[in-house]
Image (cartoon, grey):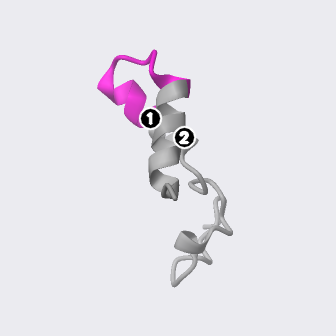
Amino acid sequence: MRDAAASYQEGFHRRWSHLRRARVRALAWLLDSPDLLDADAPHWQGPHRDHRPGDA
């Protein structure tokens, strides 16, 4: 069985292979990453979880 990272990377390449500049591809990778913007994703849980956007 294929691991999730490999299949995600292939999907990213299908969607974003037209981007040629490294910085633009890096930004697309960050914005398209699974769970990156999901505040309830497991990797965002921990001591910093109480600092949500808009909190002072």
Determine crowd level at label 2: few under 14, some 14-19, many 20+ residues with C-alpha closer than 10 A.
few
Q: Which residue is mark 2?
A: 31
Seen from the viewer's position, the closer of residues 31 and 53 is: 31
Q: Position of residue 48 (x, y in %)?
A: 52, 77
Task: Name the amino acid type tagged 2.
Answer: Leu
Q: Secondary structure at mark 2?
A: helix
Residue at position x 36%, y 17% in the image: 20
Q: Position of residue 27 (x, y in %)?
A: 44, 35
Query: Can you say which quadrant of the picture contains the C terminus?
Result: bottom right
Residue at position x 54%, y 36% in the image: 11
On screen, 32 above or below 53? Answer: above
Q: Specify the principal SS of the magenta part.
A: helix
Task: Name the amino acid type tagged 1.
Answer: Leu
Q: Which residues are magenta?
A: 15-28
Is the C-beta separation of discs 2 and 1 under 8 Å?
Answer: yes
Determine crowd level at label 1: few under 14, some 14-19, many 20+ residues with C-alpha closer than 10 A.
few
Residue at position x 64%, y 59% in the image: 53
On screen, 21 above or below 44? Answer: above
In the displayed structure image, the side of residue 56 where residue 7 appears, left or right: left
